[in-house]
Amino acid sequence: MTELKIAIAGASGRMGKMLVEAIAAASDVRLSGALDVAGSPALGHDAGAFLGRPAGVAITSSLATALAGARCLIDFTRPEGTLAHLAYCAEHGIAMVIGTTGFDDAGKAAIRQAAEKTAIVFAPNMSVGVNVTLKLLEMAAKSFAEGYDIEIVEAHHRHKVDAPSGTALMMGEVIAGALGRDLKQCAVYGREGVTGARDPSTIGFATIRGGDIVGDHTVLFAGDGERIEISHKSSSRVTYAHGALRAARFLADKSSGLYDMRDVLGL
């Protein structure tokens, strides 16, 4: 069986290392390239050195070098970096798995445009559990369409730079879609002072940042006499890494198109 050659962006970061480790443990994929930003102290070092067994791939800031021979690039970095990688991958027909969050509308449009030239899985959360949770939320929202207030609470580590999290926003979009609403029109991202009574058509968001929390998400459906909570809590980034590899395998036989994890998982 031919190994799927995968390159990793941000290879020396927390998520990058988790991806390198997941690839090393899999028998059907191989690390073919490791990318990091210019000036990173990791440049020139073997991407698998932290595991105590070299991967035979040096970390580089050169896109051409990192992506030479790669079938897919997995990218969990920053929007500006991901968009630069996206342009190169689209031009050279390299598939992408994008787990980066914080894109604006222009960034999302660039991803859609690039998907006309290469195959892309774009999802704010690659966890299999999170994506099953999204399906449960869609079902729940339809049942709690009337008489229930909806609030989304998310918590992440102190280093996360965007808020609300991409996963929380995706939860909001799924719920709003199930209710026939536009999240841009009904989302409430902060409350302070005398806010007045709660508008029942809104979807509220609350953000917590602290410590080393990998990622906790809870959606509260609060009605009269009962509360229903649907939660997903991550204790390790390994779930994201395993989901990203599933996405890369899904793209192996595709030449173009934009997909998400629900496509990968058949949901």
Image (cartoon, rainbow, N blue to C red):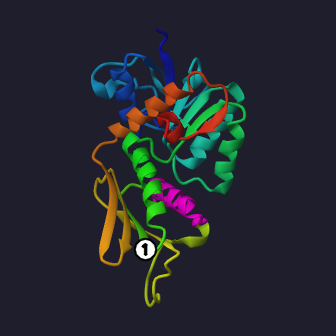
Quarter of the rendering containing residue 184: bottom right
Which residue is at the front of the view, 101 or 245? Answer: 245
In the rendered image, which quarter is residue 156 located in? bottom left
- Is residue 133 visible to us here? yes
What residue is rendered at 34% in x and 58% in y?
230
Is 240 included in the stretch rendered in magenta? Answer: no
**What secondary structure predominates along the stretch shown in magenta?**
helix
Q: Position of residue 86 (x, y in %)?
A: 63, 37
Above/below status of 113 relative to 206: above
Residue at image coords 45%, 55%:
139
**Residue 238 at x, y percent in the picture:** 33, 37
Relative horizontal placement of residue 138, taking residue 104 as reference (left or right): left
- Residue 145 coordinates in the image, percent (x, y): 48, 68
- Residue 192 % position (x, y): 43, 83
**Circle 1: residue type:** Asp
Residue that lies at the very extreme toward the top in this rendered image: 1
Q: Callout 1: few (<14), some (14-19), or many (20+) C-alpha neighbours within 10 Å?
A: many
Q: Along the horizontal axis of the image, is 192 left or right of 230? A: right
Q: Which residue is mark 1?
A: 149
Instruction: Name the residue rendered at 65%, 43% in the picture.
Output: 111
244 vs 65: above or below: below
Residue shown at the point (38%, 33%) measured from the top left: 242
Which portion, as a residue range, is magenta? 163-183
* 181 within the magenta span: yes
